[in-house]
Amino acid sequence: MLEKNKKKMTQVYAFLAFIVIAMPVVANNYVMNTFSDVFFYVVVCLGLNIVVGYAGLLDLGYAAFFAVGAYTTAILTSNFGMNFWLTIPFAILFSAVSGVIIGGPTLRLRSDYLAIVTLGFGEIVRITARNLKITGGSGGIFGIERPSFFGIEMNGNIHYYYAFLILAFLAIFISYRLQYSRLGRAWQYVREDEDAAEAMGINRVRVKLAAYVIGAVFGGVAGSFFAVKMTAISPETFMFTQSILILLGVVIGGMGKIPGVICGAFVLVLFPEIFRFVGDMRLLAFALIMLILMLKRPQGIWPERLG
Amino acid sequence: MSTLDIFFQQLVNGLILGSFYSLVALGYSMVYGIIKLLNFAHGDVYMVGSFVGLILLGLLSPFLGAGWAGILVAMIISMILVGLLGVLIQRVAYVPMLSAPRLSILITALAVSMVLYNFVMASTSGEYKAFPVDLGYEGVEFGNVFITYTQIILVSSTAILMTVLHFFISRTMLGKAMRAIAIDQDACRLMGINVTSIIALTFFVGSALACAAGVMAGVYYGSIHFFMGFLIGLKAFTAAVIGGIGSIPGAVLGGLILGLLEAFGTQLPFIGSEWKDVFAFGILILLLLFKPTGLLGKTEIERM
């Protein structure tokens, strides 16, 4: 029975993958742009899911990592004339380092303290970006050069559709591999019972730090691509509400479960697009949905099944 | 202005700022002390309080004018209304979640905060609203330092509110029940204390104090905005942690310290006013790392 289910699920996933790969044949620019946003949120939500879902650490400043990646790419390409693809390793390096800087000292804190400290860190990053010269101050950086991929100039929606689709597939693959790895099981253990995990020989701080760093790298890489897709970034892109939006994606779908988080990312982007007519009220509607969801179904739409 | 004058001017600014922080920090600390919940929505309760005060002032000013009489009445009524809002939030959002995992209840608190500020944002179209008061700029002068009557009245009303709170908590039966619940809920239940309603009362008092701060901030700054609760929520939490979260004198002390630090911090070389928020959060982070119990907090056995 289980085997059969698994086979069926694989077929369903293959079918879905085929649809998203083939979609640009029929889709117009608006749909492709919307879906590249969806894939972008799949990547960042999966990144945050590693921190919140797998390791159980509430991070309210995730947009900071995304900002580090975006600014790294923007500064290196605009000020130093570096090729976009070469900036990605730097974005990974800097976001990983910022993961260590934020995670290292705070991981000893209790979960609610951690939440507020990460929130503070997120604000510090944003305010720093606003006040420094190299980050372009409150105006941000604009005119970021579009990259080329084997001679193809990446300037159409279709290019970013595929770029983010590939990133999303990569993120899903890595998340999936991590979930069932030794590290993934350690995260789950630490999340459920920290003291017992430590008693079993799991290095609590190192395991949590790993979650932070890997989550940060997801955000950083997504940020790099975000910078070249938008060609302009400003500190206001990385406000607290951005972190909350990403967290919302993780929570709505169901923390810890990959298909759930993907669902969450879809809801995050498609809900405001579909309910455009609600206008100003749509964020309110979103907030109410989140509240009701937390009260009635705290495990999310498609939660992780333990067992 | 001489250095000494700047010192006294910043002292006044810091005290005003600090008294707002203290009032909001009290709500964080009281709720945390009793149910160990970090009430993310508290900053937004302060913001809603400010808007309720604005509406009431608009309704009352034809009868009471735009002076202190109108402000006082509007403040008292809005404190009661917002106190009830606090109780409503507790009933709807937190009571069902008390036995849930910590992460879920934190996210619920976050959701409440989003509901409040998005509601205000949608109903004010995200605009700044001017506070309809007219208090003039008279004041007293000490050398080159000028203090308006508004500043004096605001700081003394904060002091009055805190004194009342102090006597309420230390001298009345209800206050005693609150302190008892913070120590051991189950024992309180056995002793016949109605734990649920005392927790509701805590939310009422905390929210009413935040509302008072909100109305005073509106009077002081002259205009209010839906996003004003976010930053002060964060700062007040910082203040509560500085003083030792759960401790009531600590919240007051922490608020004043943070207000003064911020006021003087802007005078330091290389740290302009654009870095003042970074300064405050930096203090929070350092404090949590080296002394998470704060200045007046009790040491807990539980790992921080």
Image: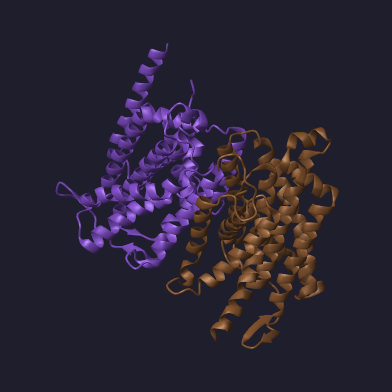
Q: In the displayed orientation, state which residue is furthest to the top.
A: A1
Q: Which chain is brown?
A: B
- Residue B14: x, y in percent? 61, 71
Left or right, residue A91 beside residue A190: left
Left or right, residue A76 beside residue A150: right
Q: Residue at x 69, y 72 (%)?
A: B132
Name the colour scheme: by chain
Tell me: residue B257, above or below residue B64: above
Left or right, residue B129 beside residue A169: right
Q: Quadrant of the N terminus of chain A?
A: top left
Q: Which chain is purple?
A: A
- Residue A70: x, y in percent? 33, 54
Q: Residue at x 67, y 36 (%)?
A: B96
Say if residue A176 shows up in the picture: yes
Q: Residue at x 75, y 41 (%)?
A: B181
Q: Nearer the viewer, residue A240 or B139?
A: B139
Count of number-bearing discs? 0
Tell me: residue B223, above or below residue A91: below
Q: In the displayed orientation, state which residue is furthest to the left.
A: A151
Left or right, residue B82 beside residue A258: right
- Residue B94: x, y in percent? 67, 41
